[in-house]
Amino acid sequence: MSSFLRMPLIASLALVASVASAGCMDPGSLDEPVEEVQGGRAPVTLTLSNVNITSLPGASANAGAAGEFIAGGLRFGRKGAPNLSNSLLSAVPGAPAKVLFVGQAAAFDEVIVAVRGRSGYFVVPAAANAIVGLDLIAATAGFEGKVTVLVATRTAGKLTAPTQLKLLIDNRIHLSTGDLTNHDDDGSTIADLFAGFLEKTQPGVAEQVIDSTDNNEDVQADGIKGVKGPADGGHREILWDGVPQKFVNLPDFSPDFFNRLDDGAVGVRAGCVFTPVNGTGLEVNDALDGVIPDPNAPPLGPNEEAPLGGDFSNINPKFAGNFLSLTQSAEFAPLGTVITDITFNVAGSNTPGVVHGVGIVFTSVDRSNTSSVELFDEQGKSIIKLFAPAVDRGPFPFEGLVNPDRFPNSFVGFIDFDKRIARARVISGEVPIDKAADDLPKGKRDVAAFDDVYYTEPQP
């Protein structure tokens, strides 16, 4: 079944995989306004309970300003549609999606947010700024599914044309493509918001929550990194940036590096095993433009930021500047295959474990319905299969990495505390990264890698 995901409950969401890119809409030769919000329909408040300027510290000017719902009709203008940071976001009912940034060349007075097929709209004060960040807060009841959100700006009473965004409202599925960062004081990303759902601190809260605990980051009294499981709280993260340099840019990365046991010699006590399916190996990569960092370099200090990297240009020079990590310095791919199985153990042991949620950042997904995450229970039965959305093409309010009109990352996440996930099968691209002549659009098939992995605390 080739659909966006494999579950009857949400079969209607299949079209999300073919979301149009964010950016300016061309109204062509239309003589009338490009969109109209009409009365007599169900109000937009059944879909979005509110739209506010995000309150994340440092993320946006005019922080915390609340939008006002207007019940009347509205006609958008024909030109000047604003640029959006994302073309696809998902939100859990009662909570906001990842921050949506709205920007244009000139400052504007207000942001107008409507939903196609719903009446009324929100007016959000922008206070004469050229970029603002919005929290789209999904209504707590009455709707789950995919909608088209229309975003315009208004200056001196004049409306622009709208730019459209696909918003998926679902309490289990987390998807995004485009700019995954929140541009706040803490440098948080969509994965930090996802962590709140993994720890059950975000659901039902109508503001962004980024406080969470990564149990893999804690160094124990025995000097081993990672809390021995099962821990009472927190969640787990696989961050390739933390792998020692001597194990990076080589084709033999250990599948058990993040499954260190008490008597192990190296690695993190994380309860996570990576296995290439019918492949030849695994590689953590932090190369950039053909340059490989010195494997004998000392580790970064606590206040040092990891450099940009992870383009696999040591494998193929044509990849230079293409695959870039969301967390700046390193990412991951199987060799000789595009399939990686992730299995779980109780951290610090070989006792099989299960999790209730998994999130993965993909890099350079250029073709829809290719890269995916499929989750299985302990009996090997498929729980769900989610396709990674293809990367956005700009323009954007913020410039992308290396290419200003391209953010290379996509996010796929799923959480259901009634499910026991024993295995995640990750398909990254259409051809192995070490076998491809080139990536799209110059190549014939899509080449992709994946970045950080997030999951709930493994339980027996």
Image (tube, rainbow, N blue to C red):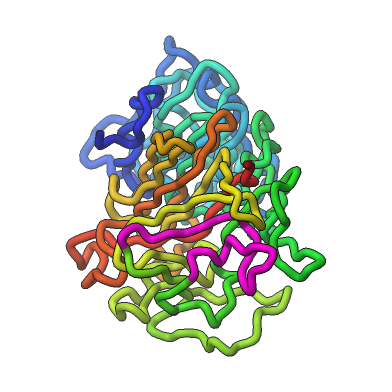
Residue 277 magenta: yes
Is 181 on the left-hand or right-hand side of 250? right
- In this rendering, is residue 235 above or below 356? below
Q: Position of residue 271 (x, y in %)?
A: 60, 55
Residue at x 45%, y 63% (from the top left corner)? 400
State whether the magenta stretch is mostly helix, strand or loop: loop
Q: Does residue 440 appear in the picture of this structure?
A: yes
Q: Position of residue 202 (x, y in %)?
A: 67, 37
Q: Position of residue 300 (x, y in %)?
A: 66, 79
Q: Does residue 133 appear in the picture of this structure?
A: no
Q: Quadrant of residue 374?
A: top left
- In this rendering, is residue 319 above or below 145? below
Question: Furthest-right residue in view?
Answer: 221
- In this rendering, is residue 374 above or below 403? above
Residue at x 33%, y 69% (from the top left corner)? 280
Q: Position of residue 321 (x, y in %)?
A: 38, 74
Specify the quadrant that holds the C terminus: top right
Magenta stretch: give its range: 254-278
Residue at x 62%, y 27% (from the top left corner)? 94
Residue at x 31%, y 80% (from the top left corner)? 317
